[in-house]
């Protein structure tokens, strides 16, 4: 019910569409006839264009000054990009904004203050597709109200390395979970009649050397991992655009990679929208155009204007066929017509209900927080607690967010100013949602003492005199800024050690962008993973700590015990020489995250899918059957505790005879809200591609005949999991997962 109310609130915030083309289109402009399908309209529009108009659609401008280059005056100030419209044909311009967590601003004097969602990892931790959709709908509404009709959102790169600086933008390590959750976010964004963008296509799995790295991987393994996540996101959203990435893939730049763009995306998957480059990711004219790139983004970032006069000359000379240019523009027009961009023009100055949108962000944060540990039931805190020590993390004033192009500037201004780095990928932003003030509101009679945590000895003295000590530990990462290691920065491990030694009721609250190591774990009774919790993060943290909200988040990524457990203990590349080309050999293939740990027999710090609650759940009655060509799994979930809560039952599958890249795969899940003593019957339909191996030569998913073990578990470690065995017939699926 809360989600429906929030979605209704978002809809109410949309500006009146006074320019909507409700009247029948003039006969001389049949592409404006909304009774025609998007394919027909796109073809008609392109047929009516001059060559100059066609060329203008494939050449995009940055929306901010770039060194000596000035933005086009028509672009919105401090925006990501702009593509001029064709006014004589009634086709509006495209106004582009970063990014996946809200309406971001480029640096400058006119930053937009908008609502920020929690990190992508936090949303993935909810395992709740409805929340993912609601969050997307909210930030899409703010994009429209801000004058944007393209949102560069939909990051679905898998978490292959826990140190990747952009992991916080993405949705974890499993292709089924990541693709499903991101697909719903993109679908929510596009419900506002704007275009959203699935990115970064593909294998952009670290930031170190991102412009020069060659990501090397077996094609079939890529199809079963990173590409499957992208494919599922596109199928779940029907996104209007895909953004190709900076890196090379198997020797060829992603934005001129015929295999990725033409063969996989457009032919195999049937993608009908357009491919835009990342800003600075275009490296050629003819090769890029002929191999599938449809639009050069932010041309100012490239070494030359590849899709400017050079493309016009290449088409004139026949090196890029005229039909290819027409296809490039047709795909852009298709996305605009399919998503309602033409019928629903955008304008700046739309009304935004920041309170309602903050509530959407807060629920996402609350449901995404993961209770990692809770010995002695230290949490939830009693409202009668007498003294609370709050230590570190600027928790007196705000909550942290990640850096780079996804950065949303907070409503009300920066909670902490002057932190390094001050320039891109900074500034380091704390949203003015104070955990301290929110905690005081939950326990109004408690004495609260704050220490900034810069002196461990002093912090320990403060903690010793308190009933409970809350240490807020932070890790700032961002675009172009991988973590140096899994350790918390700035000697925070020593701080936690000191505080835990002084107070045996120490709770660690993590605000981080990726998995981190916890050498102090055995000394602290409780750990709450809050991620980057967004606009309303302080309130969300307090509500979870005091039990106003029962934590229900589950990890979308494995937490390693140390770097030595990773496929590459040392991060590839040279941080001191970012122009030095190198390759990363992803020899683990599709065995990412929990699959790698299973394959190698490693015990993680916390397994994929882990998450605790203030109540308890039991699972029973596991059964499975094949019906209508798909595998269906049924079971019962019961809340056996004394508090209302949400369970996340997870179904994993293992072949008993066939050989996969790893012992098991996530096959499905559900999120179930239950009152104390309540039970619900749950049915999960298994995605057929999860049961097969991809055959690159035949372009089929092949499910082997034989027995498969289905495990109903609370996490990937499978402790106390129920299981059942099912016989599956041999089956061949086409490249899109359909029965042949």
Image (spheres, helix red, strand yellow):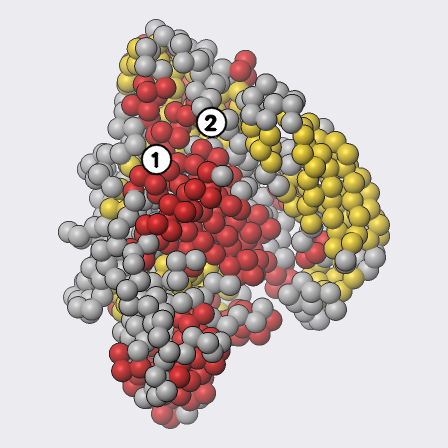
Instruction: Measuring from the top left, give residue 442's x and y in whole percent.
Output: 36, 19
Provide the secondary structure element on which disc 1 rests: loop
Say if 438 sits above or below 601 in the image. Answer: above
- Image position, residue 98 (x, y; %): 33, 56
Q: Residue at x 28, y 36 (%)?
A: 430
- Mark on residue 734? none
Examine the rendered structure and indicate whether residue 368 appears above or below residue 660: above
Residue at figure coordinates x 22%, y 44% from the top left: 422
- The answer to which of 719 and 339 lies nearer the viewer is 339
x and y percentages locating residue 169 in the rendered image: 42, 48
* Above or below: residue 141 compared with residue 43: above
Image height check: is 660 above or below 88? above
Q: Secondary structure at mark 2?
A: loop
Distance, label 2 to label 1, CA atoms, is: 14 Å
- Please indicate whether residue 454 sits to the left or right of residue 191 in the image: left
Q: Are there few (<14), some (14-19), or many (20+) residues within 10 Å of tag 1? A: many
Q: Which residue is mark 2?
A: 549
Q: Residue at x 24, y 46 (%)?
A: 113
Number of on-image labels: 2
């Amino acid at each position: 019910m809360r989600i429906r109310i929030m979605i209704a609130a978002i809809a109410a915030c949309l500006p009146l569409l006074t320019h909507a083309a409700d009247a029948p289109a003039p006969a001389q402009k049949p592409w404006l006839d909304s009774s025609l399908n998007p394919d027909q309209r796109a073809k008609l529009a392109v047929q009516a264009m001059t060559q100059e108009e066609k060329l203008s659609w494939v050449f995009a401008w940055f929306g901010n000054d770039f060194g000596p280059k000035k933005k086009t005056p028509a672009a919105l100030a401090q925006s990501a990009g702009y593509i001029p419209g064709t006014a004589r044909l009634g086709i509006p311009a495209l106004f582009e904004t970063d990014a996946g967590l809200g309406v971001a601003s480029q640096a400058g004097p006119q930053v937009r203050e908008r609502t920020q969602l929690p990190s992508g990892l936090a949303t993935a931790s909810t395992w709740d597709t409805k929340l993912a959709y609601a969050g997307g709908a909210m930030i899409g509404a703010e994009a429209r109200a801000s004058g944007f009709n393209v949102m560069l959102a939909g990051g679905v790169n898998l978490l292959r390395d826990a140190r990747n600086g952009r992991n916080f933008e993405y949705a974890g390590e499993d292709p089924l979970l990541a693709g499903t959750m991101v697909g719903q976010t993109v679908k929510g964004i596009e419900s506002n009649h704007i275009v959203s963008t699935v990115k970064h296509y593909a294998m952009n799995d670290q930031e170190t050397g991102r412009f020069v790295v060659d990501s090397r991987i077996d094609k079939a393994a890529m199809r079963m991992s990173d590409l499957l996540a992208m494919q599922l996101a596109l199928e779940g959203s029907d996104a209007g655009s895909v953004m190709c990435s900076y890196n090379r893939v198997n020797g060829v730049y992603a934005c001129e990679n015929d295999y990725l763009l033409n063969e996989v995306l457009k032919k195999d998957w049937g993608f009908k929208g357009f491919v835009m480059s990342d800003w600075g990711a275009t490296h050629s004219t003819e090769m890029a155009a002929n191999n599938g790139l449809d639009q050069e983004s932010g041309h100012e970032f490239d070494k030359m204007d590849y899709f400017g006069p050079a493309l016009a000359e290449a088409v004139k000379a026949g090196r890029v066929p005229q039909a290819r240019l027409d296809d490039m523009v047709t795909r852009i027009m298709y996305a605009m017509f399919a998503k309602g961009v033409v019928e629903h023009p955008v304008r700046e100055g739309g009304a935004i209900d920041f309170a309602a949108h903050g509530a959407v962000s807060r629920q996402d944060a609350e449901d995404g927080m993961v209770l990692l540990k809770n010995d002695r039931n230290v949490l939830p805190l009693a409202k009668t607690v007498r003294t609370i020590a709050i230590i570190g993390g600027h928790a007196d004033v705000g909550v942290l967010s990640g850096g780079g192009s996804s950065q949303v500037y907070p409503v009300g201004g920066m909670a902490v100013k002057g932190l390094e780095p001050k320039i891109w990928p900074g500034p380091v932003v704390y949203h003015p949602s104070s955990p301290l003030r929110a905690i005081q509101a939950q326990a109004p009679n408690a004495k609260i003492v704050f220490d900034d945590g810069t002196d461990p000895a002093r912090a320990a003295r403060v903690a010793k005199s308190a009933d409970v000590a809350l240490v807020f530990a932070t890790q700032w990462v961002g675009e172009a800024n991988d973590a140096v290691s899994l350790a918390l920065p700035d000697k925070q491990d020593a701080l936690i050690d000191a505080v835990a030694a002084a107070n045996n009721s120490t709770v660690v609250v993590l605000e981080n962008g990726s998995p981190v190591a916890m050498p102090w774990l055995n000394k602290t009774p409780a750990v709450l993973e809050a991620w980057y919790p967004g606009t309303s993060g302080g309130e969300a943290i307090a509500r979870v700590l005091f039990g106003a909200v029962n934590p229900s988040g589950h990890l979308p990524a494995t937490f390693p015990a140390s770097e030595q457990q990773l496929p590459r203990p040392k991060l590839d590349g040279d941080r001191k020489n970012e122009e030095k080309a190198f390759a990363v050999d992803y020899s683990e293939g599709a065995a990412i995250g929990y699959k790698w740990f299973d394959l190698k027999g490693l015990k993680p710090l916390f397994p994929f899918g882990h998450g605790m609650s203030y109540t308890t759940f039991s699972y029973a009655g596991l059964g499975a059957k094949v019906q209508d060509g798909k595998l269906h799994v049924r079971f019962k979930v019961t809340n056996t505790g004394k508090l209302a809560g949400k369970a996340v039952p997870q179904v994993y599958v293992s072949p008993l005879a066939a050989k996969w890249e790893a012992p098991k795969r996530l096959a499905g899940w559900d999120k179930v809200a239950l009152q104390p003593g309540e039970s619900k019957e749950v049915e999960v339909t298994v995605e057929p591609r999860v049961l097969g191996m991809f055959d690159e030569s035949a372009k089929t998913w092949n499910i082997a005949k034989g027995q498969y073990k289905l495990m109903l578990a609370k996490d990937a470690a499978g402790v106390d999991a129920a299981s059942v065995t099912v016989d599956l017939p041999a089956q061949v699926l086409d490249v899109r997962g359909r029965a042949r």
